[in-house]
Amino acid sequence: MRALVWQGINKLAVETVDDPRILNPHDAIVRVTASVSCGSDLHLVGGYVPTMRAGDILGHEFLGEIVEVGSAVTKRRVGDRVVVNSFIACGQCWYCLQGKTSLCDNTNTAPGLNDALFGASLGGCFGFGYTTGGYAGSHAEYVRVPFVDVGSFVVPDGVTDAQAVFASDAVPTGWMGAYESNIQPGDVVAVWGAGGVGQMAARSAMLLGASRVVVIDRIPERLAQVRDVIGAETINYEEVDLQPELRELTGGRGADVAIEAVGLEAHSPGIDGVYDKLKTNLKLQTDRPTAVRQALFGVRKGGSVFILGVYAGFVDTFPLGAMMNKGLTVRTGQQNGHQYIPMLLERIQRGEISTDHLATHTMSLEDAPHGYEIFKNKEDGCVRALFVP
Ligand SMILES: NC(=O)c1ccc[n+]([C@@H]2O[C@H](COP(=O)([O-])OP(=O)(O)OC[C@H]3O[C@@H](n4cnc5c(N)ncnc54)[C@H](O)[C@@H]3O)[C@@H](O)[C@H]2O)c1
Ligand SMILES: [Zn+2]
Ligand SMILES: [Zn+2]
């Protein structure tokens, strides 16, 4: 089959690779009908999450048709049209039973790799290198889906591929950030990042009763989508002084809830950006935590911060003092969307969550290297590239 493979830092190519096979009775093989780029892939492509090996297949946000099931599969059958959660969960371990499916104790095939960095291992994920088990990704004609009964969800009638595919990752991630921040009716919510994840967090915050939601970014096309499709307010941080602007919007207090959806490659214009670039170039820190710093400053005293952006390791000048003295609650995590996806698919079906506008560029899998180029550089208004194998 054809697949998009990582060949080295910033080197992608479409190659012919072996078809996947059923390896475990709980597996299924899915014929991929849509697979999208995600901001998390950029951390892999650029070598910031350094556990990819040359030849690994990228992609973790996808949808397709089941073409083969293992002997222990009970809920899914050949022909089902399913969206698959990007994280692979067994459904039976202590973490899965608490709903923390991205922390599954059984699906990471290389747990030792995480121990040095994190002191524990996270669950498995498609196309995300050996930090999450080295599973082949979804930018391919076919993909093996382990524990398919747990991780796949039948797409309701009337929901198109371009709508449903985002229920794999961007929608449950955004929902988790808003829902698990315990947003109260009337809250003011600030979201850093107007990519797929930030937009879905903003929409979720609105559905959960926030009175005002403001999304912060600098890319005009993305901010326009936030205003026109999501229905939230925007701040272009290159046009105004961000922190005073946030105070102005919130009666001088700051946001009740701050959601960070930017991640370790944050654009960092100020002096702290120069410092971060220097430290990452010298390998003295792994990540650029600009948006996390801003979120910790922009939230009100006693407020709540959710870090959805992916961070790989260690950072410097983390404002621990602000976090402690302001009495903040900080939550974070990889998405544990298994519990939310059926409800989110229904909301997509009812038109409460719009997703297909994120797929600004639809192309064949053969064009995926170009898709990543424009997605990475935010060229031509690209928010997400959708590949049809
Ligand atoms: N927690 C999870 O399970 C999970 C799941 C999916 C994605 N993610 C992560 O969420 C993050 C966002 O993903 P995405 O697909 O939306 O990515 P994306 O690259 O499409 O969007 C990131 C956005 O952040 C903006 N940005 C950069 N620096 C900024 C700053 N200083 N302030 C405000 N905005 C800034 C960029 O302009 C861009 O629009 C990534 O780090 C990704 O890895 C996490
Ligand atoms: Zn993702
Ligand atoms: Zn588990």
Image: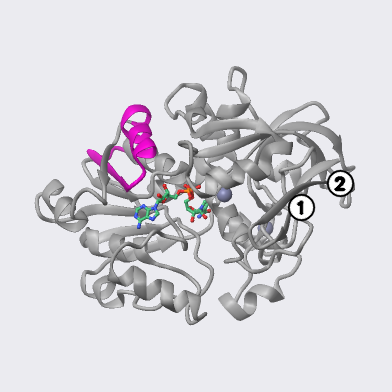
Q: Is residue 19 visible?
A: yes
Answer with left or right where residue 213 lies relative to residue 341.
Answer: left
In this view, the residue in front, 192 or 327, is 192
Residue 35 in picture, x, y percent from top left: 66, 38
Q: Residue at x 74, y 61 (%)?
A: 134
Which quarter of the rendered picture does the C terminus lie within? top right
Which quarter of the rendered picture does the N terminus lie within? top right
Answer with left or right where residue 37 lies relative to residue 280.
Answer: right
Q: Secondary structure at mark 2?
A: loop
| Distance between the alpha carbons at the discs numbered 1 and 2 | 9 Å
Q: Secondary structure at mark 1?
A: loop
**Residue 31's image quarter?**
top right
Residue 184 in picture, x, y percent from top left: 27, 45
Residue 217 is inside the magenta segment: yes
Residue 60 in picture, x, y percent from top left: 65, 47
Per the rendered image, the range of residues in magenta is 208-230
**Residue 113's image quarter?**
bottom right
Residue 116 in picture, x, y percent from top left: 62, 81
In this view, the residue in front, 255 or 243, is 243
In this view, the residue in front, 185 or 304, is 304
Q: Which residue is mark 1?
A: 136
Q: Which residue is mark 2?
A: 20
Name the amino acid type tagged 1: Ala
Name the amino acid type tagged 2: Pro
Vertical comparison of 161 with 18: above or below: above
Vertical comparison of 155 with 313: above or below: above
- Circles 1 and 2 in contact, beta carbons < 8 Å: yes
Q: Residue at x 25, y 45 (%)?
A: 235
Quadrant containing ligand 3 reads bottom right
